[in-house]
Image: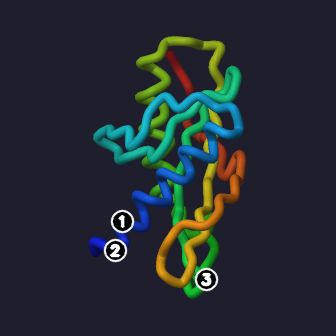
Amino acid sequence: MTSSRQDAGQAGEALAAAFVRRLGWQILERNYRTRFGEVDLIARDGRVVAFVEVRAKGSGSFGTPAESVTARKQQHLIKSALVYLRALRDPGLQPRFDLIAVALDEQGKPQRCELLKNAFECNLPYLY
């Protein structure tokens, strides 16, 4: 990833974090890493723990942000989420996998966020 793409990605994640705070969610983790990969944001929305993938896209980008989260990436996010949930040991929490699409202007600066709740489902057992 080039420096300008990294900068745009980091700025997009910062905008997404501010966006979920405005929704009243509590951010639990940013850039949570496991051996399966990284979760951009983990946030609490009541009894729901939202595992949020942030995708920054410019108008000239191909495909939608949701299309850019491949089945393989989904599996990595799910496995990382299960690691996190098992560590919490709170069976009352419900996992959810969300996507925040960050629109970039022509200069690559983040402009606005769009939330897609339940962007995909967990197909692995959630055991404690």
Question: Residue 69's spot in the image, x, y percent?
Answer: 54, 62
Three-letter residue code for mark 1 = Asp
Picture quadrant of residue 121: top right
Judged from the image, the secondary structure of the residue bearing numbered disc 2 is helix
Residue located at (71% from left, 47% from top): 117
Residue nearest the observer in this picture, 52 or 124? 52
Question: Residue 31's spot in the image, x, y percent?
Answer: 38, 43
Judged from the image, the secondary structure of the residue bearing numbered disc 3 is loop
Nearest to N terminus: mark 3 or mark 2: 2
Nearest to N terminus: mark 3 or mark 1: 1
Q: Say which residue label 1 marks.
A: 7
Q: Is residue 87 above or below residue 5?
A: above
59 sits to left or right of 35: right
Residue located at (44% from left, 39% from top): 79
Q: Say which residue label 2 marks.
A: 4
Residue nearest the observer in this picture, 57 or 88? 57
Three-letter residue code for mark 2 = Ser
What is the distance, in whole Å, between disc 1 and disc 2 at their CAs?
5 Å
Judged from the image, the secondary structure of the residue bearing numbered disc 1 is helix
Q: Residues within 10 Å of mark 3 (few under 14, many from 20)?
A: few
Three-letter residue code for mark 3 = Ser
Q: Say which residue label 3 marks.
A: 59
Q: Quadrant of the N terminus?
A: bottom left
What is the distance, in whole Å, between disc 3 and disc 2 at their CAs?
16 Å
Marks 3 and 1 in Cβ contact (< 8 Å): no
Q: Residues within 10 Å of mark 1 (few under 14, many from 20)?
A: some
Residue located at (50% from left, 71% from top): 109
Marks 1 and 2 in Cβ contact (< 8 Å): yes
Number of numbered callouts drawn: 3
Question: Residue 115's spot in the image, x, y percent?
Answer: 69, 53
What is the distance, in whole Å, between disc 3 and disc 1 at their CAs?
17 Å
